[in-house]
Image: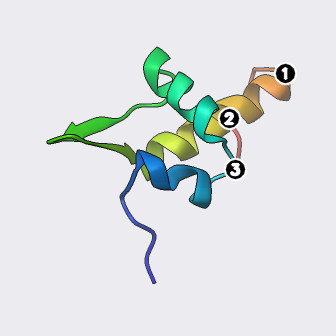
């Protein structure tokens, strides 16, 4: 089964290693991108992957990209 392009915000903690409270804080501050369709908030899978790559880069000296 293919990975979804986006997750409902409520689904993210089940699919990625991030807690609900931390996720909503990161969404509020814009550190993780999201979009709304009607009343539902969605988080693109790539936004989560990019966020995690930035975190790894910062923890590994901030200079490179995570492979």
Q: Residue at x 71, y 30 (%)?
A: 55
Q: Nearer the viewer, residue 67 or 38?
A: 38
Numbered tag placed on residue 61 in the rendering: 1
Q: Earlier in the sequence, mark 3 or mark 2?
A: 3
Marks 3/2: CA–CA distance: 20 Å
User: What percent of the width, then of the height, locates residue 23?
Assistant: 56, 34
Numbered tag placed on residue 17 in the rendering: 3
User: What percent of the width, then of the height, locates residue 33?
Assistant: 40, 31
Mark 1: give few (<14), some (14-19) or many (20+) Cα within 10 Å. Answer: few
User: Can you tell which quarter of the image residue 26 is in?
Assistant: top right
Q: Residue furthest bottom?
A: 1
Q: Residue furthest right?
A: 60
User: Can you tell which quarter of the image residue 30 is in?
Assistant: top left
Q: Nearer the viewer, mark 1 or mark 3?
A: 3
Q: Is residue 9 left or right of residue 55?
A: left
Q: Which residue is mark 2?
A: 65
Q: Residue furthest top?
A: 29
Q: Are marks 3 and 2 in contact (CB under 8 Å)?
A: no
Q: Residue at x 20, y 40 (%)?
A: 39
Marks 1/3: CA–CA distance: 22 Å
The answer to whether any part of residue 10 appears in the image is yes
User: Can you tell which quarter of the image residue 20 is in?
Assistant: top right
Mark 3: give few (<14), some (14-19) or many (20+) Cα within 10 Å. Answer: few
Q: Nearer the viewer, residue 34 or 8?
A: 8
Q: Residue furthest left?
A: 38
Quarter of the figure with the N terminus: bottom left
């Amino acid at each position: 089964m293919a990975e979804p392009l986006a997750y409902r915000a409520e689904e993210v903690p089940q699919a990625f290693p991030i807690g609900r409270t931390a996720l909503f804080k990161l969404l509020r501050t814009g550190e993780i991108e999201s979009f709304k369709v009607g009343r539902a908030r969605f988080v693109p899978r790539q936004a989560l992957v990019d966020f995690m790559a930035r975190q790894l880069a910062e923890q590994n000296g901030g200079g490179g990209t995570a492979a």
